[in-house]
Image: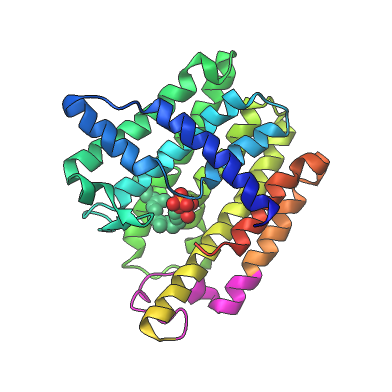
Amino acid sequence: MTAFSETIKETAALVETALDEFLPQRDGPLGRVVDAMRWGSLDGGKRLRPFLAIAAADMFETPRERSIRVGCAVEMIHCYSLIHDDLPAMDDSDLRRGRPSVHKKFDDATAILAGDALLTQAFEILAEADTHPDGNIRCAIALELARASGKIGMVGGQMIDIYAEQKDFDLAGVTELQRLKTGALIRFSAVGGGIVGGASDDEVAALSAYAEDLGLAFQIVDDILDATADAETLGKPAGQDAEMDKATFIKLMGMDGAKSKASALVERCKSHLDRFGAAAEPLKGAADFVFERKS
Ligand code: GRG
C-alpha cells in the first residue's frame, strides 16, 4: 500500500470515530432517523473531502479537534447529497458504497429526512464553539459551506445535471455543471480547512485554485471510470454507452483527451501549492490519488 493510502486511511478512521460520536443511537421514531443517518454516513466512502479539510488545516498546525469537525461537516453534506441522489425521484439507485441505499434499507420518507438532518447537522457542528473559538471564523466557514452546497453550488449543479440529460452541452457547459455539482464541495474542503487553520487571504486563494483544478480532475476521472465500467458491461468501446444523450467529458474529449486533461490538471493543481513547501505534500498526494483511483 502506498504512503498516501495509509495517510487517507488514518484520517478516515478519525472521521469515522467523530461521525459516530456526532450520531449517537436513540430509541423510538427519532432513533429511526438517526439509524438512517448512520447507515448513510458511517463505514464507507473514501473520505476524500474530510481528508482535504484536515490536510489543509494541518499545513497551519491547526488542532485536529477543529479540522476534524470541518471534515465531518463536509462529509455530512456529501452523504446527504448521495442519499437524496439515490432516491427514485433522482438517480433511483438501489446500491451505494456496495450496500443498499438508505431508501432501500429504510424507506423514501426516512431517506429524505435523514438527508435533511445530515445537512442541518453539518451547520450545527460548524456553529459550535469547539470548531473555533473565534465566531467570525466559524461564520466564515459556514458561509463558504452554505455557498458550496446550495443553489450556487452543489444543488445548482444537480439541477443543471437533471436538465442537461435532455440537452446537449458543450465542454464549457459540462465544466461549469461539474464545477458546481462536485467541484464546489471539493473546493470548500480545502478552503474550509485553510480558514479554520487561520490561513491568510492569499493562502486561501492558493488552496482554492488547487481544489478547483482537483475537483475538475476528480470529475473527469469519474467519467473515465464510468465509461470504462460501461464498456466492460456492454462490450462497446468506452464512451459509446446507452447514456450517450448525457454530455460527459468522454463524449466531448474522447478517452485519450480526457486522460491527458485530467493528468494536466493534477500537475497544475499541485503547482498552486508550491508556496507551502513540504507541508503541502499530503495535499499533493491527494491529487495523485484522485488521478490514480479505481473507484
Ligand atoms: C441531491 C442535492 C443533491 C445533489 C447530488 C454529488 C451529487 C449531487 C450526486 C452524486 C452523483 C455522483 C455519483 C456524482 C459523481 C461524482 C461523485 C460526487 C461521486 C461520489 O463521490 P466519491 O467518489 O464517493 O467521493 P465516496 O463514496 O468515496 O464518498
Q: Position of residue 263 (x, y in %)?
A: 67, 66
Residue at 75%, 43% (x, y): give it: 280
Residue 292 lies, in percent from the top left, at 61, 63
Across and down, in percent, residue 70 comes to: 53, 30
> Can you name the residue that lies furthest to the front here?
1
Q: Is residue 287 magenta?
A: no
Q: Quadrant of residue 260?
A: bottom right
- Whether residue 244 appears in magenta in the rendering, the answer is yes
Q: Quadrant of the N terminus?
A: bottom right
Judge whether 194 appears above or below 88 on screen. above
User: Where's residue 216, x and y in %?
Assistant: 57, 57
In depth, the one of 141 and 95 nearer the eye is: 95
Q: Quadrant of residue 160?
A: bottom left
Task: Write down the region rendered in magenta.
Answer: 237-260
Q: Residue at x 57, y 61 (%)?
A: 293
Q: Is residue 273 left or right of residue 175?
A: right
Above or below, comparing residue 233 to residue 219 in the picture: below
| Residue shown at 24% from the left, 40% from the top | 112
Q: Is residue 145 above or below residue 219?
A: above
User: How was this image coloured?
Assistant: rainbow
111 vs 176, nearest the viewer: 111
Q: Farthest residue in the bottom direction?
A: 236
Q: Is residue 80 visible?
A: no
Count of number-bearing discs: 0
Q: Residue at x 23, y 28 (%)?
A: 31
Q: Is residue 105 among what the camera can see?
A: yes
In-image side of 163 versus 9 (left or right): left
